[in-house]
Amino acid sequence: MTALEVYLSGEIHTDWREKIQSGAADLNLSVKFHSPVTNHDSSDDCGVVILGQEESPFWKDHKGAKLNAIRTRTLIEKSDLVIVRFGDQYKQWNAAFDAGYAAALGKAIVVLHDPNLTHPLKEVDAAALAVAETPEQVVKILAYVLSGRL
């Protein structure tokens, strides 16, 4: 069977990606993971490093956002499933965009967040096929999708 391609979008300040990836590896799941650049400096500076410096912070951010959008859109398009994590500490506007973009493409979406975010994320949750509260639940979803077994 071809590997299930999964895009891991959202919050970058905790180890949720590593938990999902190691959980999938522990179960020998045939999954290929993709994600955004999670190094803040690299993500923020990619536009000016590649395309040239800007005097205005707006244009610096604009260049970086555009290059990151190329990466994100390309990887979401090639993925079968998009996992979108929302954390408590920061606003993940990019994750909300990723969920909307994936939904527009007809991609399967699993949203991952703590229960205290259920109300503010109700519209995002409504676009998802599943809403998980832990990375371990996401691993169980991946195992079920791939094997059909509980």
Image (tube, rainbow, N blue to C red):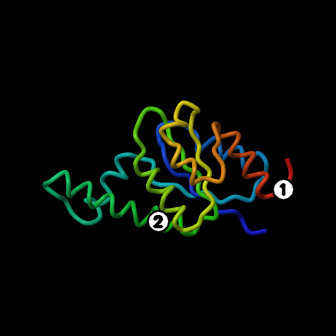
Q: Residues within 10 Å of mark 1 (few under 14, many from 20)?
A: few
Question: Which amino acid lies under the numbered mark 2 shown in the image of this protein?
Answer: Arg
Residue carrying label 2: 73
Instruction: Point out residue 142 in the picture as x, y percentages from the top left corner.
Output: 73, 52
Q: Residue furthest left?
A: 55
Instruction: Point out residue 34 in the picture as x, y percentages from the top left corner.
Output: 56, 58
Q: Quadrant of the N terminus?
A: bottom right
Q: Secondary structure at mark 2?
A: helix
Q: Is residue 73 left or right of residue 136?
A: left
Instruction: Point out residue 74 in the picture as x, y percentages from the top left corner.
Output: 49, 68
Instruction: Point out residue 65 in the picture as x, y percentages from the top left corner.
Output: 33, 58
| Vertical placement of residue 93 versus 116, above or below | below
Q: Secondary structure at mark 1?
A: loop
Q: Residue at x 57, y 47 (%)?
A: 125
Q: Residue at x 41, y 67 (%)?
A: 70
Q: Residue at x 59, y 57 (%)?
A: 82
| Vertical placement of residue 84 versus 52, above or below | above
Q: How many numbered tags mark residues here? A: 2
**Nearest the camera: 138 or 99?**
99
Q: Residues within 10 Å of mark 2 (few under 14, many from 20)?
A: some
User: Sequence order check: which comes first, mark 1 or mark 2?
Assistant: 2
**Nearest the camera: 95 or 52?**
95
Residue carrying label 1: 148
